[in-house]
Image: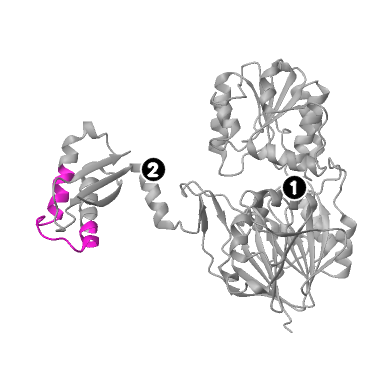
Amino acid sequence: MENSLKIIPLGGMGTVTKNMYLYEYDDEILIVDCGIGFPDPTMLGVDVLIPDTAYLQDKKDKIVGMVLTHAHDDHIGGLPYILPQLGTHYPIYGSKLTLAFAQDRLSEFDIPANFKELDDSPINIGHFIVDNVKITHSVPDARHLVIKTPASSVYHGSDFKLDFNPIDGVRPDLSKVAASGREGITLALIDSLNSEIKEFSRSESSLTPMFASEMRDIKGKVIVTVMSSNIHRIQQIVNVASRYDRQVAFVGRSIEQNVKTATKIGFLKLPGNVISRKKIKNHKDHQLCIIIAGSQGQIGSSLSRAAEGDHAQVQIKPSDKVIFASEPIPGNEQNVYAAIDSIARIGADLTYSDIVDNVHVSGHSSAIEQKLLLELIKPREIIPIGGTYHHMIQFRQNARELGYQDRNIHLLDNGQVLSVNRDKAWISQTLDLKNVMVDGLGIGDVGHIVLRDRQRMAEDGILIVVVPVEQQTGQVRGEIEIISRGFVYMKHSEKLIQEIKQNAIESLGNNTQVVIDWQTIRRKIEASVETQIYEITQRQPLILTVILEV
Ligand SMILES: [Zn+2]
């Protein structure tokens, strides 16, 4: 029997999102989380990123189970893309709400899965004994995990905060955390995202008085945008709206679906004041509170469309108030402020975190809560997770203050395998992980060349050279045609187009010859035209040569 446990982060290190961790022990693999990441602005047309699971391709039969820590998409959103690759022959564990949201993700793709709900007792998954700890976060029903093997015991401290006044009354189970510490934890993975923040995080329930004072004297509609998984925030808005005799309508696919699911399993309690979005028009503005999706300013979201005056059911008026009960995720600022600007132009009253600082509370623990958790667990080794590199560095600084030595604090990259046994922990291997991008229905078929092409099309447009070739003889017949989109306006650039055409004809050489090697000809035309266009215009449109059989 092997005497070390391997911990393999496939995502979640340095990237915040795309969380997926493997625990490998004695020929068995346990997976924790299966999240998506979000593309950066250079990844044009890419919908989501998923962890690279190539390491598992020839080890599928070793997978004994998966455990999901909470219902955020960067922890469960990868399921519809990953399960078809890894198979569904093993059980997937999670809390009630986490599994319900995971089921919604899979239902869209009609993928079956063997879900098993966690209860309060430890479970055996192969050689792994996995216990779960109730914890608080910005989505209800979140869990930390205690994973035990003969080699070592690990505390998997995924996203959390310590909220002692949670909306559902389910407080973090600190006595269970402490008990795990007394039994002995070799290594702890801890959410490090807010390691730079010193003050204890504020309770989610502190938002109720804020919503009340924001809604109190509004003459028109109250429109609130919020992360669609933040069920407890939605609960507070619904409760306050009810207090002010406002009917609540949910608008936007993600919010409507999450509200429906959370209500069905009892995590959201809707009083009598809920109407369907189609009934909005039957009510006066001062009787309405609309909870709308699109808090990150996503283009095409319900909020963005309403802000542009382009939503069938939600028209924003100057007498309305729009509340952003969220904060832009880094990278989304531009879209969020574009939405805020559009609403400001309409003249509606606005509340957002730059001008009202208690309109949002973080779902993550600050340095003080992280330290508290470490003091209870007292692990020998630590891995900060869920943050970018500077968060991990600050986390290490905080851990030093508790007496930890740098050799016991492991700042890992995705793909760095940490082996741990009864005596020590060391990096035993580094996997070469690729960026796997999901583009519409295709998985992993978009490489950097495709992205570079999209980048060039976005910046300088596209130019297509159509070369007509006679089918029977393979000879060039007729005139070469130039088509441009987003590069130059053809009518005003006749001279330039003529020059490009001439250049293409010349790079064909003797165009009466029979052309067989089209790849070479194509490359020659593209290279020659590209140089020419750059010299004349300093632009680099994407150039395509199309051989058209006539
Ligand atoms: Zn989370």
Whether residue 192 appears in this view of the structure is yes
Camera-nearest residue between 111 and 351? 111
Camera-nearest residue between 215 and 92? 92
Please give the range of residues in magenta. 499-523
Q: Position of residue 155 (x, y in %)?
A: 78, 64
The chief SS type of the magenta part is helix
Separation of marks 2 and 1 at Cα, in angstroms: 42 Å
Residue depicted at 22% across the width and 31% down the height = 492
Residue depicted at 22% across the width and 60% down the height = 518
Determine if the magenta segment contains residue 504: yes
Q: Is residue 413 left or right of residue 93?
A: left
> Amino acid type of disc 2?
Ala
Residue 198 is marked as: 1
Alpha-carbon neighbours of circle 2 within 10 Å: few (<14), some, or many (≥20)? some
Determine if the magenta segment contains residue 300: no
Q: Earlier in the sequence, mark 2 or mark 1?
A: 1
**In the image as oriented, which residue stretches furthest toward the front?**
472
Colour setup of the view: one colour
Number of marks present in the image shown: 2
For disc 2, the marked residue is 458
Whether residue 202 appears in this view of the structure is no
Q: Is residue 537 left or right of residue 40?
A: left
Q: Position of residue 448 (x, y in %)?
A: 43, 57
Residue 421 vs 69, above or below: the answer is: below
Residue 348 vs 257, above or below: the answer is: above
> Amino acid type of disc 1?
Lys
Alpha-carbon neighbours of circle 1 within 10 Å: few (<14), some, or many (≥20)? few
Element under disc 1: loop
Q: Position of residue 340 (x, y in %)?
A: 58, 29
Element under disc 2: helix
For residue 181, which quarter of the picture? Answer: bottom right
Residue 380 vs 197, above or below: the answer is: below
